[in-house]
Image (cartoon, rainbow, N blue to C red):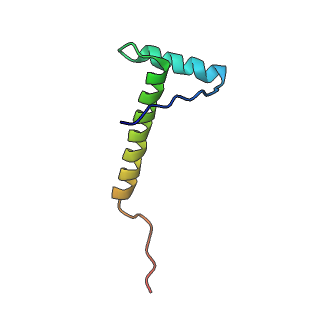
Amino acid sequence: MQKSKWHNISIKTESFEELREIQRSIPIRTSIPQTIEWLIKVGQKQINQTNQSETNEPNTRSRETI
């Protein structure tokens, strides 16, 4: 079983207030660390979807004939 590690971070007050707004908009009560973990998962999912859509798009560049 892997032991959890906690880290202290510093962020700007404005960013912390944005984080609090996000925390309040989540339909269940969560802690700040839980909110950060949720944001990381959502961000990773979005990045993966973006990468997948770029991979699945046909190549629109014109090819040179040799």
| The N terminus - image quarter | top left
Q: Where is residue 61 in the image (x, y as percent from the top left)?
A: 44, 67
Above or below 26: residue 65? below
Residue at the location (39% across, 18% down)?
26
Q: Nearer the viewer, residue 62 or 29?
A: 29
In-image side of 50 versus 18 (left or right): left
Q: Position of residue 59 (x, y in %)?
A: 39, 64
Above or below 26: residue 43? below
Residue at the location (41% across, 51% down)?
51
| Quarter of the figure with residue 25 | top left
| Quarter of the figure with residue 13 | top right
Q: Where is residue 16 in the image (x, y as percent from the top left)?
A: 59, 20
Q: Position of residue 40 (x, y in %)?
A: 45, 34
| The C terminus - image quarter | bottom left
Residue at the location (39% across, 12% down)?
29
Above or below 49: residue 11? above
Q: Which of 15 and 64 is in front in this view?
A: 15
Q: How many marks?
A: 0
In-image side of 22 versus 27 (left or right): right
Residue at the location (44% across, 37% down)?
43
